[in-house]
Amino acid sequence: MACSPEAAPPTVQTVTISYSELKDKNADLSMKIEEGFGPNSLGILSITDVPGYTSLRQNLLHLSPRLAKLPEEVKKELEDPHSRYNFGWSHGKEKLESGKPDILKGSFYANPILDIPTTEASLIQRYPSYCGTNIWPDNALPELEVVIVPKTVIPCRLGADGIQIMVPSQVVFGEDEIAYQIGETTEILSRGFLCATPHCVRAPKGEKASGLERSTFAFFMQPDWDEKLNFPQDVHIHKELILSNGSLTFGEYSEKLLDKYYHMKT
């Protein structure tokens, strides 16, 4: 069924780096990185031709709604309040800018590298958002027993709701590409040379919202929790959280930031 035409914003393609270029230790990618993440950039680039990515992505996308539809008592067992829900299941715990709980999004967080990052009690107490243990739905949704059921996929049209990069143009990249955005920690570490990507998620409204669900898989890369962050004077990011000496560890900064946007730690 054809949709009525709507005025779409102009499009701009992301800067791309192929997987083979990324693995080539002799490849100079500095120009592409500057084009993708520099002061005058969109703040995004994408990686192409990643082996096996398309099938892995589809498997995860089909698994996502199955997780969300588990019984509430099962999902409750997957929650970790101590980490401010940064491990396991989270629904209605994160807050919108208005201060109201975000009840339209469910999230599942896990460390994809280490199931148990550390057993040192002092670190777990100091950085609960990073040093917690993964919580897997082993009984309710074991990974090896996942059955992929064919679904109807509706391609995202230009100008559609969902995650939005806050620039005048519509940013586009292929389904088989992995998009990388820069976060504020990288902007701090680069002293403002690499710029964080302003973005938001817009929910569809009215008839467009009926019967639709949106699944997104994000992989966060970050410094070690004891990495010192020295905040440059000309990078105005969360100045109210920074100590007078202008220095915090990444873990300390993250805990302060989570206190601001999530439930305060008791």
Image: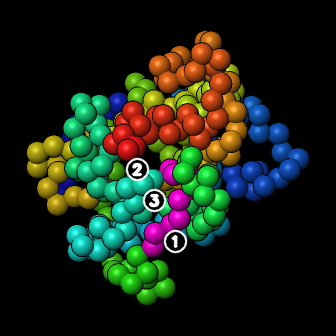
Which type of secondary structure does the marked residue at label 3 adopt? loop
Q: Mark 1 or mark 2, which has the lower sequence index?
A: 1
Q: Determine the residue located farthest toward the right in the rendered image.
A: 26
Q: Residue at x 53, y 65 (%)?
A: 133
Disc 3 marks which amino acid?
Answer: Phe
Return the x and y of residue 198 as percentages of the image width and height. 45, 30
Q: Position of residue 118 (x, y in %)?
A: 64, 61
Q: In this view, does 238 lie above or below 140?
A: above
Point 47% across, 19% down: residue: 240
What's the amino acid at mark 1? Ser
Q: Is residue 96 above or below residue 55?
A: above
Foreground mark, 1 or 2, reads 2
Color theme of the render: rainbow
Magenta-drawn segment? 128-136
Pointers 1 and 2 in contact (C-beta within 8 Å) = no
User: Could you tell me how far apart the alpha carbons at marks 2 and 3 are, in whole angstroms?
Assistant: 8 Å
Residue that mark 1 sits on: 55
Number of on-image labels: 3
Residue 236: horizontal and vertical position, in percent?
A: 53, 16
Which quadrant of the view contains residue 94? top left
Q: How far apart are marks 3 and 1 (CA)?
A: 25 Å
Precedes in sequence: disc 3 or disc 1: 1
Q: For mark 2, what is the residue? A: 84
- Kindly identify the amino acid type of the residue bearing the numbered disc 2: Arg
Is disc 2 in contact with disc 3, using a CB cutoff of under 8 Å?
Answer: no
* Residue closest to the eye, 114 or 168: 114
Residue under label 3, please give it: 87
Identified at 29% across, 74% down, the residue is 74
